[in-house]
Image (tube, rainbow, N blue to C red):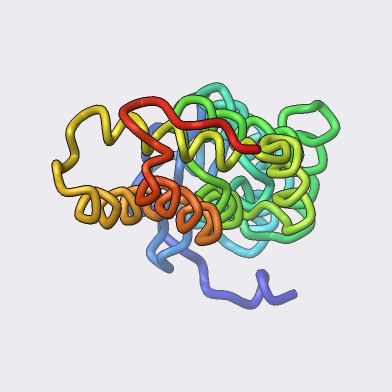
């Protein structure tokens, strides 16, 4: 009913999108994502009017396949979280909750959206290739919309007991070997800032720096713990 009461909108711009899609922008500052096919040609001309019945079609029936096709294009580049996908769909004008839910559930059922996998792979990549600590990785996963329980599960699987400290010690040793400073106290301050930026916990950073001051970490080597 609300759609039918609104004044007709005029198409003011049509943009090409990957995957055979078009993004319609109207005089009401609304966006609609539609597949470029014979049945949608009347909407793809600047100056066309969109009334209530058109809006119902554009917001639901046509938005479902368009949203799926758009999502495939995004996921072909990299993994996304469910939260990210919902936000990106809204940015393209797909706002109707039941339509967004349908798209997300379809992608989840096909295995294209998996927040647990995203968290696990993101944590593993961050540790192995970025050599980041769990504090930084936790924040990144949260910002991507991963739920708290999945974030903590992924970090537990990625950092087995003692592995956070071992990685921090290795990085600290490399910094010392690179000649951060001849002054050990000054080197410790720099390494403290460096490890904190890399996302290691305060407890681990403080322990590593204390070991450097005691002379237990030298160059790229450190004495094993008892």
Q: Nearer the viewer, residue 30 or 115?
A: 115
Closest to the observer: 181 or 159? 181
Does residue 71 appear in this view? Answer: no
Instruction: Kindly indicate the quadrant of the structure image that contains residue 139.
Output: bottom right
Tell me: 12 left or right of 120: left
Q: Position of residue 12 (x, y in %)?
A: 34, 54
Residue in the picture at 50% in, 61% down: 202
- Residue 95 appears in view: yes
Name the image quarter holding the N terminus. bottom right
Q: In the rendering, at what x and y percent does residue 76 appear? A: 56, 22
Where is residue 29, by image quadrant?
Answer: bottom left
Q: How many numbered marks, from 0 up? A: 0
- Return the x and y of residue 95 as percentages of the image width and height: 63, 59
Residue at the image point whose x is 65% and y is 38% from the top: 226
Q: Position of residue 180 (x, y in %)?
A: 19, 39
Residue at 34 percent across and 32 percent down: it is: 218
Q: Between 194 and 188, which is closer to the camera in this rendering? A: 188
On screen, residue 164 versus residue 129, left or right, reads right
The residue closer to the viewer here, 116 or 40, is 116
Q: Looking at the picture, does residue 52 appear above or below residue 191?
A: below
- Above or below: residue 108 compared with residue 86: above
Furthest toward the right, the residue is 109
Identified at 14% across, 42% down, the residue is 182
């Amino acid at each position: 009913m609300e759609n039918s009461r609104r004044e007709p909108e005029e198409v003011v711009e049509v943009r090409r999108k990957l995957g055979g899609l078009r993004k319609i922008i109207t005089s009401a500052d609304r966006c609609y994502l539609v597949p470029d096919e014979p049945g949608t040609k009347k909407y793809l001309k600047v100056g066309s009017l969109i009334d209530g019945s058109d809006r119902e079609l554009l917001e639901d029936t046509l938005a479902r396949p368009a949203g799926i096709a758009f999502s495939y294009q995004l996921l072909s580049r990299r993994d996304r979280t469910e939260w990210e996908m919902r936000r990106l769909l809204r940015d393209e004008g797909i706002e109707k909750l039941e339509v967004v839910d349908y798209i997300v559930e379809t992608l989840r059922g096909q295995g294209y959206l998996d927040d647990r996998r995203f968290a696990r792979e993101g944590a593993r990549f961050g540790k192995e290739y970025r050599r980041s600590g769990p504090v930084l990785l936790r924040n990144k996963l949260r910002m991507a919309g991963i739920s708290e329980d999945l974030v903590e599960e992924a970090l537990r699987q990625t950092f087995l007991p003692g592995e956070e400290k071992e990685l921090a010690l290795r990085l600290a040793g490399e910094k010392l070997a690179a000649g951060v400073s001849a002054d050990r106290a000054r080197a410790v301050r720099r390494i403290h800032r460096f490890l904190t930026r890399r996302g290691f916990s305060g407890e681990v950073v403080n322990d590593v720096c204390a070991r450097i001051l005691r002379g237990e970490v030298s160059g790229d080597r450190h004495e094993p713990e008892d």
